[in-house]
Amino acid sequence: MKTFQGYYSYETPDHIQGADITVTNKRIEIHLKDAHGNPRIVHWYWENVVRGEERPGGCVLHHTGLPLQTLIVPNGEFAAEADTQLKKKRRTFPTAWVTFFTTGLIILGLIVAAFVWIVPWLAGKAANALPVEYEVSMGEEAYKSLIADYKILPKQTEQVNTFYKQMGVKSPYPIQITVVDFDETNAFAVPGGHIVVYSGLLKRMQHPEELAALLAHESSHVNLRHTTRSLMQSLGTFTAVSLIFGDVTGIGAVLVENASSLKNLEYSRRLEKEADLNGLSMLKNQEIPGNGFVLLFKTLGQGGGSAPSEWLSSHPDLERRAEYVQEKLSNPEPAVPAPLKATWDQIRAGLK
């Protein structure tokens, strides 16, 4: 390791003394003597060193911070080595704005991770922890909030509820179907048991099996608490904060305030598949043909008509869903029970 001769000053140029200087990739070592003639070493790490004024045949370096420290080395070889190390420092140690930007990205990443993993996990836990009675009460308030925007069709509502009861499927929730006069192809579930069906969807159906499949699918969302969980997840920040502070009533109030979002609520593909297969199992247990799912998907996939397929837009990948349903169908499929067929004919006649 080569030693260079130079001058070191501390605080003011008056306090200057000769020094032997050595250089490594990490630091400058300044070898001095104290007032009593004893040796001491001052270490300057390159990340704290900056160039001073230009000096022919040598260089001036300063140590950042206080007190002011200066090193003068009248040697061209040392100046070249210092330039090399300072260039490395500029590549290795980012400027303040880069550090700030990087820190911001890390914080943003943690926030995104919270929303992608933590909030959905909390939403699932919250949905599963809610007592059925509270979920029913909360859903009733949400239903009252959103149904005011629709014109209810009392006759068709009664007939579709009769159809559902004739299906004979069981639920821990008081499932109630409401048919509304709206020319869109849509249906959605409300936490706690309410299902809203648009008249536009009923008009496009051609078979009673389709209605059975639709009601089995939507009631599965209710029974499996998909609706409650997905709505809580879409209101993630407030839900997470409310759960941390144990404010379940606050969650209910926000769900009621945002009840209108239920009609456009989207589920993950995993939840849609779960609702399809659970609904299919419900139909099989009651000896109702499960090919209604395939017929319903086909009807929705055809498009056309005056009404857009809202139910289709929030329930994507119909071909794949038809495939996994067909894999589970019985061979042969049972016939449609006569009471369902008779009620279906009444529903169709009333919508013409």
Image: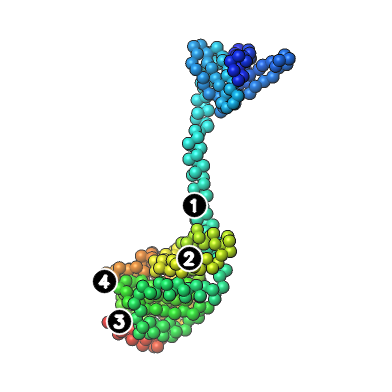
Of the residues tagged 1 and 2, which is closer to the observer?
2
- For the residue marked with disc 2, what is the amino acid? Val
Q: Taking 50 as reference, is 127 above or below it?
A: below
Question: Visible in this render: residue 163?
Answer: no
Give the Cα distance between marks 2 and 3: 36 Å
Q: Residue at x 54, y 73 (%)?
A: 134
Question: Distance of mark 3 from mark 4, alpha carbons?
Answer: 15 Å
Q: Where is residue 41? Give x, y as percent.
A: 67, 20
Q: Which residue is mark 2?
A: 254
Please tell me which of labels 3 and 4 falls first in the chain: 4
Q: Is residue 148 rendered to the left or right of residue 129? A: left
Q: Residue 163 placed where, x, y %?
A: 40, 84
Q: Residue at x 36, y 88 (%)?
A: 342
Please, what secondary structure does the residue beneath circle 1 have? helix
Quarter that holds the N terminus: top right
Which numbered mark, 4 or 2, is in the foreground of this view? 2
Pointer 1 or 4: first along the chain: 1
The residue tagged 4 is 305
Q: Which of pointers 1 and 4 indicates the residue nearer the eye?
A: 1
Task: Name the element at disc 2.
Answer: helix
Frontmost residue, 160 versus 131:
131
Q: Is residue 300 left or right of residue 42?
A: left
Q: Residues within 10 Å of mark 2 (few under 14, many from 20)?
A: some
Amino acid type, mark 4: Gly
Mark linked to residue 112: 1
Q: Which of 199/335 is in front?
A: 199
Residue 91 higher or lower than 52, as above or below: below
Choose the circle earlier in sequence order: 4 or 2.
Answer: 2
The residue where tag 3 is placed is 351
At 50% from the left edge and 28% from the top edge, which residue is drawn? 90
Percent across and percent down for residue 346 are: 33, 86
Q: Position of residue 44 (x, y in %)?
A: 60, 24
